[in-house]
Image (cartoon, grey):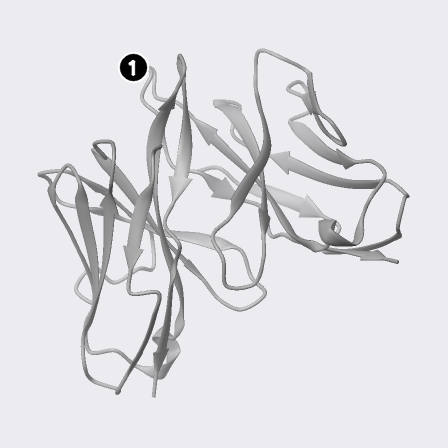
Amino acid sequence: GAVVSQHPSRVICKSGTSVKIECRSLDFQATTMFWYRQFPKKSLMLMATSNEGSKATYEQGVEKDKFLINHASLTLSTLTVTSAHPEDSSFYICSAIIRVLSNYGYTFGSGTRLTVV
Amino acid sequence: GENVEQHPSTLSVQEGDSAVIKCTYSDSASNYFPWYKQELGKRPQLIIDIRSNVGEKKDQRIAVTLNKTAKHFSLHITETQPEDSAVYFCAASPTFSSGSARQLTFGSGTQLTVLP
């Protein structure tokens, strides 16, 4: 249970185009979704936190106009990389909070490898 | 905000030996400390976690210890096997006073190599 489905798994796009990444919670409602970016051999860095029905909260240094996040329903959050450039090439991964017995935990999407050429 | 530091960045051990990875955190409000194993291009996989109301937790060959006073926690892997080779991340998260969870902050990662 508590699966987050992330698509696409890999995408190659040309500089200047936009790419949308989707994360769907399959068997639970994700009121909060976290979006991370991971460069090769580096850690997962939080980009933004999205809450269903409200504006996303972006971490310092992350351009909100470039990385558009939409969380219009309890089961779908999307990240759109607008006007992508080669430096945006990275591994993007979403994460949602889940209930674990009387506590909480986290589940992750399978990640999206974005390559901008 | 929370800052999590992880050491070492690389660790090589002989098969059968033990491996220890250490992390420190800065936010005293953090009370959930998971450890993840990540293979190249894959999602992080939870291998063990600990909450602030316990000091140690063990699951077969894997154990985690937590020292809240010193703000550090460690991952211990015994009887290492080649398939344990991967990148391991520690993480920490606090909860709001309302009980709602917040985001995970990850350590920088440790590349563990188990030599056959």
Residue at point 34% right, 59% down?
A61
Image height of A96 relative to A86, above or below = above
Q: Residue at point 64% right, 19% down?
A: B68
Left or right of A57 in this view: A38: right
The quadrant of the rendering that contains the C terminus of chain B is bottom right
Depicted B115 relative to depicted A85: above or below? above
**Measuring 74% from the left and 27% from the top, which residue is drawn there?**
B60
Task: Place residue A90 in its image quadrant.
Answer: bottom left
**Quadrant position of the N terminus of chain B in the picture:** top left
* Callout 1: SS: loop
Q: Which residue is mark 1?
A: B98
Q: Is residue B64 left or right of residue A75?
A: right
Crowding near pointer 1: few (<14 within 10 Å), some, many (20+)? few
- In the rendered structure, the answer to whether residue A5 lies left or right of residue B73 reads left
Q: Position of residue B62 (x, y in %)?
A: 73, 32
- Looking at the rendering, which quadrant does residue B46 occupy? top right
Amino acid type at circle 1 is: Ser
> Where is residue A24 drawn, in percent x and y?
23, 47
Q: Position of residue B99 (x, y in %)?
A: 33, 16
Chain on which label 1 sits: B
Question: Which of these two is toward me, B87 or A67?
Answer: B87
Q: Residue at x 31, y 21 (%)?
A: B100
Q: Position of residue B2 (x, y in %)?
A: 48, 37
